[in-house]
Amino acid sequence: MNLGSADSLNFYPYYEHLLREKRKTRTVRLGDQTSKYRKGTVVGLTCGWTATHAVVLGNIRIVDVFCVPIRSLKDTDLEGESPDCLSVAAVPYVLSAIYRKIVTDSDHVTVIRWDYVE
């Protein structure tokens, strides 16, 4: 298994049902994380409020990773995201709530898409 530079991709517990049902296949993270998550690497999929309390749900293979300003996203870039973040207009609000800071359409985000590894 090629773990690359990131050992896991962690999500807050309110996304757990989407991850267990394999309905979530994409995430948007604030900032440029393209050096942390690389295409083709296999990482653990975890769920928890903190890394020390995270539960391992399985492994995923990173299929695509790119960084752009939010205003450059297209709705198709969000296919496979959670229901609260399926439109570009929602991205700044969702990320503001998660990161607890004001996020605008000029902020850069990293879009990470994956496949589940059986």
Image: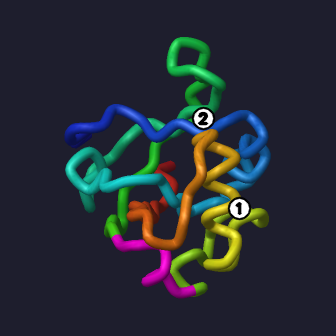
- Looking at the rendered image, the quarter that the N terminus falls into is top left
Secondary structure under the numbered disc 2 in the rendered image: strand
Amino acid at the residue labelled 2: Leu
Front position among marks 1 and 2 = 1
For the point 36% across and 66% down, the residue is 63
Q: Left or right of 98: which side holds 41?
A: left
Task: Tell which residue pokes out farthest to the top in this image.
Answer: 52
Amino acid at the residue labelled 1: Ser
Residue 31: percent from the left, percent from the top?
Answer: 37, 53
Q: Which residue is disc 1 drawn over?
A: 82
Q: Which residue is disc 2 drawn over?
A: 57
Q: In this view, does 84 lie above or below 99?
A: below
Look at the image and give the residue range highlighted in magenta. Answer: 68-74
Residue 48: percent from the left, percent from the top?
Answer: 64, 26
Q: Which mark is residue 6?
A: none
Question: Residue 100 versus residue 110: which sits nearer the camera?
Answer: 100
Find residue 98 and report its image quarter. Answer: top right
For the point 51% across and 20% down, the residue is 51
Residue 86: percent from the left, percent from the top?
Answer: 69, 74
Could you classify mark 2 by the number of other residues whose Cα lies within 10 Å: few (under 14), some (14-19), or many (20 or more)?
A: some
Label 1–label 2 contact, CB within 8 A: no
Question: Residue 1 versus residue 25: which sits nearer the camera?
Answer: 25
Q: Is residue 23 above or below residue 21?
A: below
For the point 77% across and 63% down, the residue is 84
For the point 36% across and 73% down, the residue is 68
Could you classify mark 1 by the number of other residues whose Cα lies within 10 Å: few (under 14), some (14-19), or many (20 or more)?
A: some
Find residue 107 and report its image quarter. Answer: bottom left
Q: Which colour scheme is used?
A: rainbow
Spatial CA distance of label 1 from label 2 is: 17 Å
Residue 110: percent from the left, percent from the top?
Answer: 39, 61
